[in-house]
Amino acid sequence: MVYEPTLMTGALLFLIGLAMVLLRRELLFVLMGIEVMFNGAGLTAAAAGQYWQDSVGQILVLFLMTITGAELAVALVLVYLAFRRLKVTELSEIRSLRDEPTLPEESRP
Amino acid sequence: MLWNGIFYVTSAIMLLSALSALFARRAMYGGLYVITSMVAMALLYYLLGGPFMSALQVSLYVGAVLVLLVFMMTMLHRPKPRVYIPRMNRRFWWPMLLLLVLLAEIATLFATGPQTALPPIVSIGPKAVAEQLFGHYLLIVEATALLLLAALTAVLYLSRKVEES
Amino acid sequence: MSHWLWLIPGSPLAGAALIALLGGRVRPAVCARVATLAMLVCAVAVAALWAGGGAAGTAHQTLYTWMAVGDWQASIGLRVDRVSLVMVSVAGWVGFLIHLFSLSFMAEDYGERRYYVYLNLFVAGMLVFVMADNLLLMYLGWELMGLCSYALISHWYRDADKARCGRKAFVVTRIGDAALALGIFLLYTHFGTLGFEPLLSAVSAGHTDTGLLGWIGLLILIGAAGKSAQLPLSVWLPDAMAGPSTVSALIHAATMVTAGVYLIARLHPLFEAVPQVLEWVAIVGAVTLVYAGMAALGQHDIKRLIAYSTISQIGYMFLGLGVGAYGLALFHLATHACFKALLFMGAGVVINAYRGDHDIRNMGGLAQRQPYLRLVFLAGSLALAAVPFISAGFYSKDPIIEAAALAPLGGLLWSLAILGAVLTGAYAFRLYLMVFAGPERGETVEYRMSWSMGLPLGLLAVASLTLGFVELPHGWHLPQVWGPWLAPEVGAPELPHGGSGLLLQLAGMIAPLAGIWLAFAIVRRERAGGGTSSVRLLEEGWYLDRLYDLAIVRPYFVLARGLRILVEGWALNSVALGSVAWLSRGGSRFLSMTQNGNTARYASLMVLGAVLMVGYFLWVR
């Protein structure tokens, strides 16, 4: 078999996950998209491990999963807090860190 | 030959369900689509010679991570669920453009150039993985454990009950 | 004697420095005495120079090297040959007399200390100018004189009009200064040296392109015309009368306005190499003397009249230079210094006697109140008019007129010169008669002249009458000292002999007398209310000031305003600065779009980065 289609598949999966992050506004969908992105990376790692005929690919995937789990846990708690405190479920409604551009009045030099 | 066929069909299922998750109307539908995609992914892992990985994928990703996600969906339940209607405004087209460009780039990157041939798939069992994991990569395992501990602490702290002031 | 040459310019320079630094602590009268003392030292040094044989040879002293660049050096060196000796004596002695006069004339005036600083500094500048042995040091003296002239003309600067007159003098002479500087640059570029001896010998060697020399000569002529108030740069002198009368006596009679004459005389080998330019010198002189003579006839301000007279007399000197009679021009310079300084100082006394009134139409009959003043003024007027035999002016002016007849364009030059002689007699005696003759008119005050004022006037009056005897008319086998003495350095002019010579001498004698007779007629008409002062053309100096205003000054201000609005306002402010400001503001606004708190925006930017990175990899591959 050929190696490149596997990489393509992984990349496509990554892109779809990226699309979910960029195009969907709800917080939970963003998190799901991140999961899908991780999966795409994992597929690439597994294929690479098979290329080198080594177990290191699987180990990489294992670590990815572990870290994903940890990250998701914390992220979900934050989403829950956002829902409870700020009453938002959409990414575009969280704008407290906005930097308003305030320009000085036009003055003649 | 058979291997190729199963591989491509499974990849198709995985990609299509991920795509459907992108266009899902409700959060729960999206979650279920993602679960489907991950189960297909587990099969792919097995096809690529990692049985231990496919087992972990099902039990960790599907069984723990996504279940957690589904739990959160139920906790963020709203009486009148909001339905997602995609709007083709400027907020949509700019990331779309970027994604298309990225797609084109990746396609060019992988499709052109020399194609490498893989040797026949060898199944690398759990024993080999464990030998490496607790031999060569022991320190990373310990570090990951610490990371999980940190995540645990963070979650515990963030989810404590505070007085509503 | 060469070792003490530095004392001559150094003494007034030290006086100026002393008063400038320490004058604030003492009374103004003390400053006046210090200044006069410095001038006395200078005058004595000049006398010692004469006594020590300066008249025979050349005294030379190099003080130190001023600047050295590569192979070229400029030094501060003083050199006194016979031509310089004449100038030094005029500047030193007449300068001393004027300082003496100022002791009482300028007492109780505001800014007295400032006056003496600049007066001493001016004399120092003039002496440096005439004693310099290279063009660079000469230019230094030239500029120093210009600066002090500006400061002295605007002495009563609290009156804005007087300050404007000083500025006008400075700006107009600046045009000449720029031309002179260009000429010096050209000379240096071509000859590689600025010292007079090497330079002039190189010029006389005759290997140089006459086109270039012609340009240099023209530039030097413009510079000289600026400082000496000849056409077309004569407009500053009548207005320069805004300063005190003693300033006019020093600067506008004896020293600064004669600087141009000395310059051309010093550089005469250069002019001899390009005779066409020399012709222009003569033409400038001749035209100016008639122009100024007619203008003087129409003036009613006593000092403006004498100013136009100065312009006219220096025209005679330029005429003399232009026909090759350098020694005669210098002779006229010396006599003119005496009688013109006398007239200016006398005019100052007259003005004070009439309580500050300058208008001669309000004056008359002063002879009865101020007999001494009347006598000295008469001596000066006789010298100015060049009355035959008894005045020095006759012995110096007449040979110039004769020499002009023999030059190329001699007919034109001689006619203008003779006409000028008639006009000179007319306006000189018009002035004298209107102020001193006839019954008493006008308001006078009792004004007693102290000895410090009377003595200089008397000495100058004597000089005005007797100085001429060193050069008696030629062709009669009479003793002549001046011409032969200067001939080794500047050559001797050709003068007409025989029948035509006699005729020309006769004409030269009749012309001033005719002018004086005219003066009587004019004064009678003036007293009746009309006369030449009612002729507007003459009074306004042929409207030269107004012509310059329309042709040069107004367009210049329009141009300046245009530049301010267009170039500075639009191009620089709006376009250049504005675009920088617009860029910064626009850039800031653009960049702050990335900080709007929108998470989706941040994610998009990360993807943008990824796109760029992958693109780079693709490109590299």
Image (cartoon, grey):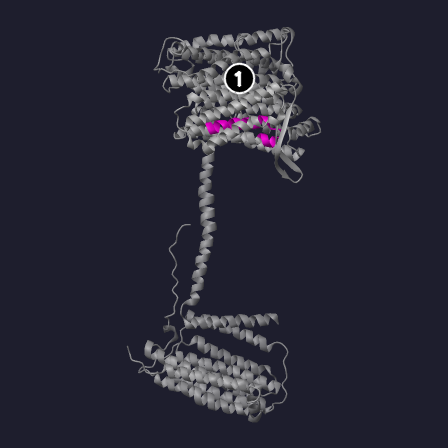
- Say few, some or many: other residues with alpha carbon within 10 Å of mark 1 (under 14 / 14 to 19 / 20 or more): many
Tell me the quadrant of the picture where the N terminus of chain C can be found. Answer: top right
Measured from the top left, where is residue C104 in percent x and y?
Answer: 42, 21
Measured from the top left, where is residue C276 in percent x and y?
Answer: 63, 23
**Quick check: A97 left or right of C606?**
left
Secondary-structure class at tag 1:
helix
Reading the image, the residue beneath label 1 is: C336
In the picture, residue C325 is in which quadrant?
top right
The furthest residue to the left: B165
The chain that hosts pointer 1 is C
State yes or no: residue C272 in magenta: no
In the foreground, B102 or C248: C248
In the foreground, C490 or C177: C490
State yes or no: residue C119 in magenta: yes
Q: Is residue B59 visible?
A: yes
In the foreground, C398 or C619: C398
- Magenta stretch? C116-138
Tell me the quadrant of the picture where the C terminus of chain C can be found. Answer: bottom right
| Prevailing SS of the magenta stretch | helix
